[in-house]
Amino acid sequence: MGNTKHTKEQIRERIQQKKILFDGAFGTYYGGKYDTRQLPELANLEAPERVKEIHREYLEAGAQILRTNTFAANSFCMDIPREQIGETLRSGLRLAREAVAEWRETTGETKEIYIAADIGQIPGEAMAQKDALSREYEEICNIFLEEGADFFVFETFSEMEELLPAIKMIGEQAFITVQFSVNQFGYSNAGLSARKLLQKAGEAKEIDAVGFNCGVGPSHMHRILQILEKPEGKLLTALPNAGYPQMVTGRMLFTGDNKDYFVDRMQQMTALGVDMAGGCCGTTPEYIAELAGKLDLTQYPQAKKDTEPEKQQAPKEDRSFYHTKEAEGRNRKLIAVELAPPMGIDDEKLMDAAHLLQKSGVDVLTFPDSPSGRTRADSILMAEKVARETGMCVMPHICCRDKNAIAMRSQLLGAYINGIQNFLVITGDPIPSMVRTTVKSVFNFDSVGLMQILADMNEEQFTQAPASYGGAINQGRRNLEVEIGRVKKKMAAGATFFLTQPISTQESADRVRRIKEETGARILCGIMPFVSLKNATFMKNEMAGIDVTDEVLARYRADMTREEGEQAGVQLAKGSDRHDGGFCGRLLFLLSLQPGDHAGKNTQLMFFFKKQLTNLGKIRNK
């Protein structure tokens, strides 16, 4: 009877009639029971009796859903050949079935038991692995389906984008549960709120049950569930940890006996509408036995939460750098100027430039976030100082290279509190190869992922004056269709403007024009007025994504005076403006065009800025 095949409808109908119990933790219980730090999934092939013994203990405790011992059975967690990973998955399902059959034979028990193919989040570290992660989830699910799995549990996920192809592939073939892991404040490691995670999962018709596991203890999980709406048409799960662990000699240990407290909190959660209850890290068969003996599993009709009369919402305040100009219908292009923060502590040149630009009709100053993976002063702190001292609108770049989602949210909150509400969101340049052995990139997500976090924060925190954010366009990408798709994806994630790489040729301008025509995006075209042959040659040969043609190089001579070089840069800027025919705004790269900060005297630099903006002003009103 352990091998009975169930349909989605049968499982759903059973749980709608009476709430049901999952088992408890496998990994932490296995490590404590057998005093080992070995990955428990290895036991599927090396010590199968240990695996079946734990399954039988949970069955004897009263669990009706057994999760297979396959949570970390993937190529990222197990350093074994892929064929062995497949066998580990198959063995995990087979051992659970054998445990059920042996338990039935011993006890004579006939109640329905469900075996859930357990799949944990694969800890991919690089954004380039996204497609690989999706493929591996599909491969894992295919193996389980071939073995006749009718119930899947995807658990401890921080988001579900890479998971969706596998979920859609399973479709109607099996019952699908997706569980997320959030911290005590209700946010996942990907920076998404519990509300957003449930909302996203609720939109996938293939998913039957959604909820949370791991991450927090029962009290915090109860608090999170109290403020959430149960997704319509979905069953709800809750599998908290026993509490919070201690780290002892590198091992995660759960100490203390809080089973009564755990049961009390779980009873409160089932009263909120949880249909499927159980435990995660730190829970044992004793915890499940207590739940089975004391938890009321009756399915009571759920009273809908009282809805207050809809209050008239105050109009949202638009603080985007482009709002005022567009609202007033001024017939001129948006002008942004990029100032690269210093590599050291001397910001005199940058501040001089900012004060000059304050009087030049510039709409926003932007600050790159350690471009090319080389350390510069923090973009947000630099932007905050400039805004405070000049009163100008500022827009720091935020890249995904150096921080995880927790640090990102913290940084964005701090920026917003300090009056910064415009951001350019980019994935970020990789770290230079010479320092990769000592400095590691983070890249938990790409620019679209960070935009989704900002969209979530606009709904949760920045409700009255949402942050405005945009993205970058690489018009030089070989496959322009891919770039157009990326722009559309960013717009769907809430991006309202885009900045391009520098434009110096008609071909580059035509590619940007096509992106605008196909997406309708608000675009500021990059202008980079090189000041010397050395400057232009450096950009051509060392800076990825910046297209410097031979025609551009021909404008400069090695023996040019500084004044002649500056004039050639101004003429290049004018040419860039003519290339695009006036269909977009302007992003003028200034300090960033000085590799190694060889800018000369402040007076000369300020004069050059003024000359560039004066000439740009003459052409932007055409």
Image (spheres, grey):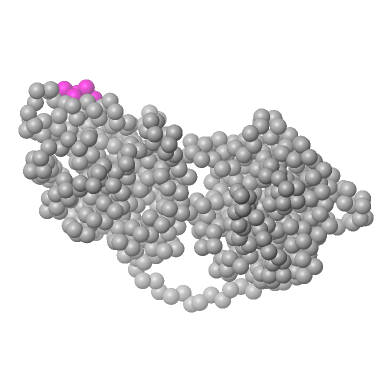
Residue situated in front as seen by the camera: 518 or 206: 206
Indicate the position of residue 308 as horizontal and vertical percent values.
50, 77
Q: How many marks?
A: 0
| Place of residue 91 in the rendered image (x, y in percent of width and height, measured from the top left) | 77, 38
Q: Which residues are magenta?
A: 548-555
Residue drawn 76% across the image and 36% down it: 45
- Can residue 470 be seen? no
| Any part of residue 401 in sight | yes
Q: Quadrant of residue 596?
A: top left
Does 42 sit above or below residue 412? above
Q: Which residue is at a point 56% across and 76% down the rendered structure image?
A: 306
Percent position of residue 475, x then y: 33, 34
**212 sits to left or right of 490:** right
Q: Quadrant of the C terminus?
A: top left
Residue 285 falls in image quadrant = bottom right
Q: Residue at x 81, y 60 (%)?
A: 62
* Picture residue at 19% right of the left edge, 41% below the top: 590
